[in-house]
Image (cartoon, grey):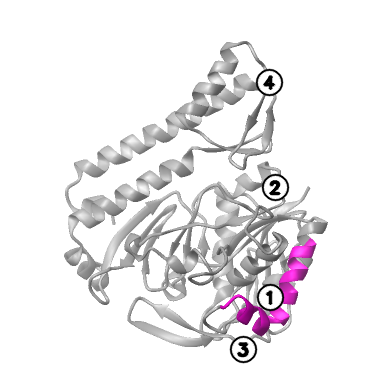
Amino acid sequence: MDERLKKALEISNLSTVINDKKRLLKEQFFDKVIVYKHGGIFTITPELINFAQNLLDRDLDTAVLIDDNELPINVTDLDEFVSDLYDTYFSATNKYFQDYQELIKNRSAEKIINV
Amino acid sequence: MSKGIICFAVNNGSVDYLKQARFLAKRAKEYLGLPVTVITNETDYSGIFDNVIDITESKSNNIRRYYNGSEEYEVLNFQNDSRPLAYDLSPYDETILVDTDYIICSDKLLMPFEQQHDFMLHDKSIDLAPWRGSQEFWHLNDAGIKFYWATCVFFRKTEENKIFFDLLKHIQENWNYYNLLYEISHPMYRNDYAFSIAIHILNGFQEGEWAKVFPRPIYHSLDKDFLYKIDNSTLTLLTQKHTEYDTYTVTQIHDTDVHVMNKYSLEEHIDV
């Protein structure tokens, strides 16, 4: 093992590694819930999903939504848009959940940082 | 509309930016499927690039410290003065301009092509060493204007963007003046600063929305950290520890692009 890594692993305490990993998992979750659609940029939140689903439930095919840059975006295929929101969001939450479970299961820095 | 990546690789005798550019191009093809143009003053550029544009030797007199971990550093010439030529030299209608020390581990850079803004870059970052805070990347100085990263920039060929890059040239040519005007604490020309100043000017000398920002921050590791391993899209780094000098914490990140500033340890892991 590289001497620098060995030294770092010896000195690192477990909580530092775990907290750092938790922070990155959270940030990566937020990376994954961004979608670029119809020229706009949307961060998927439960609120957005609920709102878009509500529009769909009112039999709308098209709706103008305000994106992350506060620009009006004409969403012309609301059905597909909502479906993409669900898929992307739950794909991200499931990944976050799996990675988080893996993290709390492993109780050593070497297991968490699999080198 | 043509789309692709451009990068600048101007070696300084110690750091091999062209080698980094080869690595960037290899990963750009793997993760993004985009063509890559390198802009360089080197002549041995065989292989992976789709397009090579020669530029003349840099006239830059910049010098800076290149750290290799928190203990060692070299003071070297830093030839970063070609960046304002990006608009003129890019062969693409839609361009991602990226630093050679940006490690692509995802398809995230394809996203800007899907949206309507003609100029985008990062205004926020996530330091892989969380304790550092990195206030230097928030504003140009304590009372200064907002900081923007020139590391990864999306632009389309538009009249307005031409004006932006022409303004960059003007700022660069008159760097001493702008350095004083914006009260930057050291004389070195930095592209991040020049971009930030140009955006400030185009916003009417105030904060504004001329430049749109990527929805998520850029991840970075300083040159006081080490890149320990690259395993496909998993990067393992030793990040500088807060409490003790020359000690490090192990950090691992998956499927995420990272700006790795330690050129020496990056070069150790380049397999092209």
Q: The disc numbered 4 marks a residue on which chain?
A: A
- Disc number for residue B117: 2
Residue B91 visible in the shown view:
no
Q: In the picture shown, does residue B118 fall above or below B10?
A: above
Q: The disc numbered 1 marks a residue on which chain?
A: B
Q: Secondary structure at mark 3?
A: loop
Q: Is residue B163 magenta?
A: yes
The C terminus of chain A is located in which quarter? bottom left
| Three-letter code, disc 4 | Thr
Q: Secondary structure at mark 2?
A: loop
Residue furthest right as drawn: B159
Q: Are marks 1 and 3 on the same chain?
A: yes
Q: Are marks 2 and 3 on the same chain?
A: yes
Q: Which residue is mark 3?
A: B61
Q: Are marks 2 and 1 on the same chain?
A: yes
Q: Which residues are magenta?
A: B162-183
Task: Name which of mark 1 and mark 3 comes first in the sequence.
Answer: 3
- Disc number for residue B82: 1
- Disc number for residue A62: 4
Q: The disc numbered 2 marks a residue on which chain?
A: B
| Three-letter code, disc 2 | His
- Between disc 4 and disc 3, the foreground one is 4
| Three-letter code, disc 3 | Asn
**Marks 1 and 4, Cα distance to the nearest angstrom?**
46 Å
Q: Secondary structure at mark 1?
A: loop
The N terminus of chain A is located in which quarter? bottom left
Give the camera-side residue of A102 and B85: B85
Contact flag, marks 4 and 3 (Cβ < 8 Å): no
